[in-house]
Each structure stands twice: as C-alpha cells, then as structure tokens.
Image (cartoon, grey):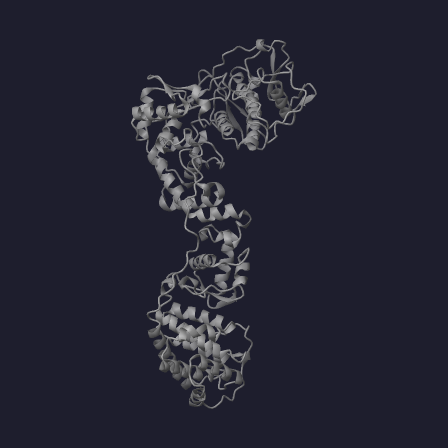
Amino acid sequence: MASTSSSDFFTINLGVRPARNYRIPSPAAQDTHAPSVSAPFEPATRTVAARWLKKDQPFSVGKFLIPGGLLYTTLCIDPHETLCEPSLLNTLLKISAEDVNTASPLMTYWPNYISMSTAARRGYVQWLAGGRKESGADIGYVFLFFYGLERRALVDSIDDPDAAADCADIVNEVERLLDIYGSNSSFRGYAESFLDYLTCPALEEKLYAEPPPAISPMRAGLPMALRIALGQMAMDQHPVNAPWALAWALSDPDITRRTPAIRCPEQLERLFISEFERTYPDGIVLSLNKTRLQISYRPASKVISGPALDFGDLPDVTANTFNRNKLQYLLDRCSSELDAYSRFVGRYPEHALHLEGLLQLPISLWPSNIHDDLESLKARIEDDLEVMTLSELGKRFNSAGVLSRPLLLAMARALESWQIGIEPDVLAGSRTPKPNDYIALFVTQPDDGALRATPAFNAASLTLDLASAVTVADGRITEDEVSLLLNQIDAWQHLSIAQRKRLKAHLGIQLQQPPGLASLKSRLDVLTTEQRKTIAHFLSSLAQADGTVSAEEVKLLERVYKVLQLDSHSLYTDLHGAATPRFTSTNFGVPLDTPIPTVRPQTGGVVLNLDRIARLQRETEEVSALLAKVFAEEPEPEAQPAIPPTINETHGNPAAIIPGMDSDHLAFLRLLLSRPQWTRAELEDAASDMDLMLDGALEHINDQAFEYFDMPITEGEEPVEINTDILEKLNL
C-alpha cells in the first residue's frame, strides 16, 4: 500500500479483511500518488446541539430503543437552530401514537425528519428500532438514514479524527444495507458510488496486477477500482485479459446484458472467458483516448455537495466506443449460445442441472462430474460397445423424465462431440427409441459423423434386421451365429470402417431386441419377386449357420416368406439346397442378455464352416447391392432441431435514463452525468472518443430531456454544467 498523507487517507484493520484505505475529503491533497480531491460543501454551520452516535451506541425515542448507532440525534427544543441535516433525529418532535406499516409510501422524494408527518416519523423510528433490516420497508427510510452516513464520511471527517475513524463502520453498514435493499436501483447506484469513493485505491499501485473486483449481477455501474485499472492498462499498454474484460462487460451500464447474463451468470462467465481467450489470445491493448478520468460523487442528500476525484492524465477508457463494441459483440455471442438454456431455467429452475437442462448448454459447460462420467464411459467401450435401454442412459446422466426427440438429438450431438456414437442413429433420421428400447454406445472418430447414412449402409442395415430376426428365433444365440454375423459385417468392404463399426452396434441392439417382421413389411413391399427370392434364400442359408435349423426358426422363416409374399414350399427347397452336414461339436448356446462376444481367431472352440461362410459372404454382398439399388432414390429424413428456434430474449438496458434514447447518446449522457460540470475542451475530447459531434450530441440530449421532463440536461457554454433539478427525474 502506498504511503499517503494523513489529511487524505487513514488506514484501519477490519479483522479478517485486509487493510483498506478510506478517503477523507480535503481541499488540497498533498500526496502526489493520490488523486486530487475537491472538498464537499455544506451550506449551514454545525452547532453543539447535534451529536453523532457511534456504532452500537443505543438511545431511546419514546418507548422505542434504537440500537446500532451511526446516526445524528438531538434534544434541541427549536429544531431549526440545530444542524442542517435531514437525517437528524430530534427526539422532542412528535411521532404518531399508532403503529405504522413501514411499507406504506409516507415519504417525499427528499425526506427530512423535521418536515415529515408524525406517521412517517413513527415509521422511521419503527424501522430504526427493528435493526434497519425490514426488507419491505419504504426505501425513503433507508435514504434518510443514508444521508447521515454521507455527512459523517464526507463532511465531518475532514477535520475530525473521530469521524474519520467511523468510516470503516460506515462502509460495513452500507454494504449490509446493499445486501437488503440493493434491488432498488436508485439506492444501489448511490450506495455503490459512495463505497467506491471511500475505498478509492492509491494510484501508484498497478491494480491490474491483481484479479479484478467481484461484480454483482445487480451492479449499477463500473467500480472505481475497475475504471482506474483499465486506465492504467491503457497508459502502460498492458493488454486487458479475459477476467478484466469480463468484469468490464458485466458492469458497464452502456453494455447491454441480455437475460442469460442474469439467469445463468456462471455459465456465461465461463463461456465469455473461453471465447475471449480464443478470439484475443494476447488480450486487448486499449487505445489512449483523450477523455481523462474524473469521478464525482453526487450525494443522495441535497444539503451537501459531492467531492470530485481528478486522476491527472489517466484516460477514461469507458468513453471509447470501439473498446466497448468489442465486448458487446462477445457478450452477445455468448448470450445467444445460452438462450435455450436461459429459457429452460426460466421455466424449470429446479431442473437446471438435470440432463434436460444440460442438453441446452454447450458440452464444454457441463459440470465436471459429467465430464468424468463421459471419460469413464469412453474408456470402458474403447474396443467394444455398451448396450442399454434409453431410460438407463437417461438415468445415468440424471434425466428428470423421458427424453423427447429434440433432447435425444441434442444428447447424440453432445456424445458425438465426445467421440461416443449412439445407435439407433437419430442424427441420420432413425426413429426415436422408446424408454425401454435398447440403444448402443460405441467410440467414434472425429470425422465419423460424415460417413453415415449412405444407400449401401441403409441396405446393409436392413439385411442385418432380417438376419437378426431369423438368428434369434429360437430364443438362444450361439457364439457361432454371432461370429458369423460379425464376420459378415467385416466382409462388407464397400462400407467404411466407421459404418461397419456402427453396424456392429446396430447388431448388438437387434440381438437384444430383434425387429418385428411387420415393421419391415413396408420397406420390403417395393421389391420385385426375384429380389424377394434372393433375400429369402440368403436368410435360409443364414439360419443353418450353426449346423441346425430349429422348429422356431422354421416357423419364423415361414412368416418371413409370407411377408415376402413367397410360396412357403420354396422355403423347404431353399433349406434343402443350403443344407450341409450337421456339426458334431456341442452347441454353445448363451442367453440373449449375454454381451456380444468378440470374434476370436479360429484356433479352438467352435470350428466354422469356411465354405459356407464364403458362400454366405457372396450372397450377403448380392443382397446388399440389391437393396442399395432399390433404396438409392429413397430420400433421407431430415433430423429435427435439437432445440426450439432462438428467441432474442433480452434483459434490457439496466439504466436507460431517458426512454428511447439510442445507445451512443445514452453512453455520452451517462458520461456527462458523472461530473457536475465540464469545460468545453473536455467535452470536445469526450465526444471525439465516442465518435459524436459535440454540439449535435448536446442538442439531441437536451431535446430529449425537454420532451420527457420539460427541462434541459446541461446549462451554460463554458463551463457546461449539469442541471441539478433534473437529476431526481432521471432513471439513475
């Protein structure tokens, strides 16, 4: 911490908090490292009739015991002979005998304890006696109490060491009041500016060397420490990094923050930092604009004037439109990516961390435990696949209900980005599985998604559907049968490796949940009689792959032939033609719920009939080519969108000041109001930084003010002064 003049600062340790500097107004600052301070003005002199109650010093008003202290009180018989302070609580003034509803609007815009009604005084005393914490109380009571805090810190502390020592307690009290009443934008604006002034850092410290100040989503404006740090970065040509850029974007009132920034701040912050670092890997170097940083604190109390802080040549980078537009663009882009999630959270806040909510987010923003689960799943199925029901998949990732098709499409896209494929391939138009239907997960390669859904693949898939239906007809599946089907897939060299891997996943589902022949009928009706015979003969051959044909398989084949509209007698001819001597080895039957075995080298166990395999491979290729030709003209179904079309849901400008004013003039107006007066040269620089013509900008702003409030914003030519009468009418 820089050494400072005792007339400007004092240092106090706040226990668990680090030491903080509290600014004491002074007509002339001696420390060259600190900003110069103009002293506040008090229009009336103090008398000994008023006294200040320190923190936790109690006193009584009638039957009420007022705890907490930190306010002015008096017993003066003539209230007009005492301190000119609206918050001064004269215990001799009457209050209503009846209890008052403190939420009732009994206060004027500029409350004053002397001129308040007895009912309003009673309400104020009740609020004080209750510990100044009733959340529903009229904000006028909070402001009246706040006036006293302003006087103690800005006026008394100039020449009173005891008052200077009270600043730490005042800061803590204002922070406490902000926690309770910060939803009132007017009080928040005054309180934050007051705290900024009291805790203003010394300029010799490089503030950007530390993390940026924490930004509340309800922050009304840029913290003073942030504005100073940004000015220092511009002076030193030190790049603004992602955390400082985020703090700027979330607190600058001239940067519009849409609803996602309010509803899902954690996700927006992570996304913004990621996008900023990707877009500006070396940060943003700010230009040295002409407008110099000067901050004036405008007290809520109208009987004292605010001190002004002049920071010498330090630029006010917030006056640079180009810098602000960069941040606005990034913030808008991030908000658009979070629109769907924001709408979901708005409707179903209790499901924000369920799968249905997470699927509205980019997968990079999913919780770390979900990322760990995905990595574990990917490692487990690296050289295999995993078959489960759709509902089991949902439960594994904390689904709150049934996955609809849009959500399943989003889930498939998320898994694919993690190089995990899902079958059935809903992204290629496959039907949506029901909750109890089986799905298969397997590892993919980054470009596998572009290799699916060709006519040859569709034909191979249909062939597998028919083959699976015949293979599992007897309720048991042998290793021989599974190996044969897997070998058939490997033999389809006209398909890519990725397509064959997906077909094996498809087979895994079909062996657990074989398709019904009725569901295939509509796809087979387009075939000619000869084409149907070719398929039927192939399936008859496949049925004998294990060396035997069970009665159940024969019955199913009869149904197949019936579906294919073929004479059932030709079935027995096909079976006889495909017959070969039975195997003498033991049948290796396994239940249907047994995982699909990996194809093993033929060094032991069941010995496959290689001649039959070769013949079936040739027949399989013929059937695949046949079906590919038939289905070549079949249009591929278009995948449905994963989320509803984006709606430009906007939180709105947090401080419009004058309704309908465009963003450029609004930013200029806000800069104007940051000081009580400007020289013509200073305004020329500010307008130039904002790409505005000064005279035209002032005329436009004053015309708007006349239209809404029948008075101008500025007065005079040199200097240009802010019209104080309009301040209470503006949305500040």
Residue 330 position within the rendered picture, expressed as x and y whole percent measured from the top left: 38, 42
Q: Quadrant of the C terminus?
A: top left
On screen, residue 533 above or below 681: below
Most extreme residue toward the right, as rendered?
63
In the figure, 277 relative to 212: above or below? Answer: below
Q: Residue at x 37, y 77 (%)?
A: 527
Percent x, y for residue 407?
47, 57
**Numbered-mark total:** 0
Residue 712 is situated, as x and y percent measured from the top left of the image, at: 38, 21
In the rendered structure, the answer to whether residue 432 lies left or right of residue 85 reads: left
Q: Quadrant of residue 103?
A: top right
Evaluate whether residue 351 shows in this view.
yes
- Depth order, front residue of 566/655: 566
Query: Between 433 and 224, which is closer to the camera in this rendering?
Result: 433
Q: Is residue 338 visible?
A: no
Q: Quadrant of residue 576?
A: bottom left
**Relative to the observer, which residue lies in front, 439 or 565?**
565
Identify which residue, 629 or 456, lies in the foreground.
629
The image shows residue 690 at horizontal and vertical percentages of 32, 30
